[in-house]
Each structure stands twice: as structure tokens, then as C-alpha cells.
Image (tube, grey):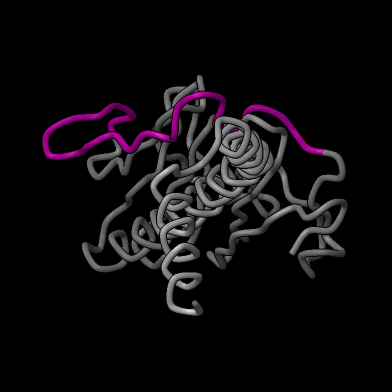
């Protein structure tokens, strides 16, 4: 008797397995999956933009260091220049103010990223940086290093001058969501990248 009962129970269980999920179960599962996806996508997008902003700031910092090293290593002036639209920049090895020869442009990410396009609130201050004066936007969208690594300004044609940078220079970098990073350089050539977290620069 028990054997027959077990066989019937086994057949009912197998029949239940063969039926699969009901339409209601499938719809509920899909609704939960879509809700989780809707909650996750904005976080992933923001994380991606934050990463791009951080990567761009560190890239600009690295290119400034590279420009300074190039000037010292080649025993001649080298410049890092930025476009008026804040969407690309380049290492100017022949100090002509334009991209020539082996020089190449480096582009910032598209869709809302920009450099030198405004000052955030709060802006970087001397107190945060530990300097004697507040940083100023780089004059004429560029900076040059003479052969022993000292920082000088470029003129309106983005050609190096003999004028030392009077205060720390800053390049503000903005993402599409209004988040800011910055790269600073002191007149002596000290370079650092910064990130604005709420109202605090780190």
C-alpha cells in the first residue's frame, strides 16, 4: 500500500515539475529584476563618470609631470597647452603654440566633460593647498617649463614667455553631473591632483 502511495506522490511531483513556472511567477520575477536594474543603473553610471573624472585628473597631472621632465631631460622649454573649448590638450615640444610634427592631441571624454570651463564652489584655496596665495587659472590656457623645471607663463598665442607664474596655477575639470577635480602646479613646479568631495577638497 505504501509503495503505491509513494508512486502516486512521485508521479504528482514529476507532473508538477513538468508544468514549470506559472505566468504570474514569471511576471513577478521579471518585475523584481527590472526594479533591481532600475536601481542599479544610475549607481553604475555615476561610478563610471566618477572614474572618468578621476582618470582625467590623473592623466593631466601625469602629462604636466611629463612636460616638466621633458624640458629638463631635453634641456629646452616645453609647454602643455589646452584648447579654448576645454576638450583637448597637447604637449608642445617645439613651443610653437600649435600641434606640429610628432606632437599629438589628447582628448577629454565626451558628453559633458570639460577643462578650464569655470570655477567650482568652493574653489581651491591657499589654506587647503598649504601655499602663500590662492591658485589662479592657468594664464592663456597653458603652462611652460624652462630647462631646469621652473614654471613660466605662455602668451595669448600660447608661446612661452619669460614671466614666472605669479601664484599656483589650477586646471579645473568638470564632469556632466557638476562634479569637479583639479590639478595644481606651484611656481616651483610642484604638481598635484585634487578631488572635490561635497565641500571638501582632498
- For the C terminus, the quadrant is bottom right
Name, please, the residue furthest toward the bottom: 2
Image spot of residue 53 (x, y percent)? 56, 46
Question: Is 95 a magenta residue?
Answer: no
Choose between 84 and 77: the one closer to the eye: 84
Please name the residue shown 65% across and 48% down the image.
Answer: 181
Choose between 115 and 168: the one closer to the eye: 115
Image spot of residue 93 (x, y percent)? 25, 45
- Extent of the magenta region: 96-120
Choose between 163 and 92: the one closer to the eye: 92
Query: In the rendered image of this protein, does residue 8 appear above or below residue 88?
Result: below
Please name the residue shown 76% across and 35% down the image.
Answer: 119
Q: Is residue 189 left or right of residue 66?
A: right
Name, please, the residue furthest toward the front: 1
Image spot of residue 194 (x, y percent)? 66, 58
Among the 4 quarters of the image, the one containing residue 98: top left
Query: In the rendered image of this protein, does residue 149 appear above or below residue 151?
Result: below
Number of on-image labels: 0
Among the 4 quarters of the image, the one containing residue 23: top right
- Is the magenta region chiefly helix, strand or loop? loop
- Mark yes or no: residue 58 visible: yes
Image spot of residue 112 (x, y percent)? 56, 25
Please name the residue shown 44% across and 42% down the image.
Answer: 19
Choose between 115 and 136: the one closer to the eye: 115
Question: Is 99 a magenta residue?
Answer: yes
Amino acid at each position: 500500500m505504501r509503495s503505491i502511495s509513494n508512486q502516486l506522490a512521485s508521479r504528482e511531483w514529476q507532473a508538477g515539475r513538468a508544468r514549470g513556472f506559472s505566468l504570474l511567477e514569471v511576471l513577478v520575477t521579471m518585475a523584481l529584476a527590472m526594479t533591481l536594474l532600475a536601481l542599479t543603473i544610475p549607481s553604475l553610471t555615476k561610478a563610471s563618470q566618477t572614474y572618468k573624472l578621476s582618470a582625467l585628473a590623473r592623466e593631466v597631472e601625469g602629462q604636466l609631470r611629463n612636460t616638466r621632465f621633458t624640458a629638463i631631460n631635453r634641456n629646452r622649454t616645453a609647454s602643455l597647452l589646452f584648447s579654448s573649448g576645454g576638450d583637448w590638450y597637447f604637449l608642445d615640444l617645439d613651443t610653437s603654440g600649435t600641434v606640429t610634427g610628432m606632437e599629438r592631441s589628447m582628448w577629454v571624454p565626451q558628453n559633458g566633460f570639460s577643462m578650464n570651463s569655470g570655477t567650482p564652489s568652493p574653489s581651491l584655496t591657499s589654506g587647503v593647498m598649504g601655499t602663500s596665495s590662492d591658485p589662479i587659472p592657468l594664464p592663456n590656457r597653458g603652462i611652460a617649463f624652462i630647462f631646469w623645471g621652473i614654471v613660466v607663463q605662455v602668451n595669448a598665442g600660447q608661446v612661452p614667455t619669460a614671466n614666472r607664474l605669479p601664484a599656483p596655477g589650477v586646471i579645473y575639470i568638470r564632469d556632466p553631473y557638476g562634479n569637479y577635480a583639479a590639478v595644481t602646479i606651484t611656481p616651483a613646479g610642484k604638481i598635484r591632483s585634487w578631488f572635490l568631495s561635497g565641500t571638501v577638497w582632498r
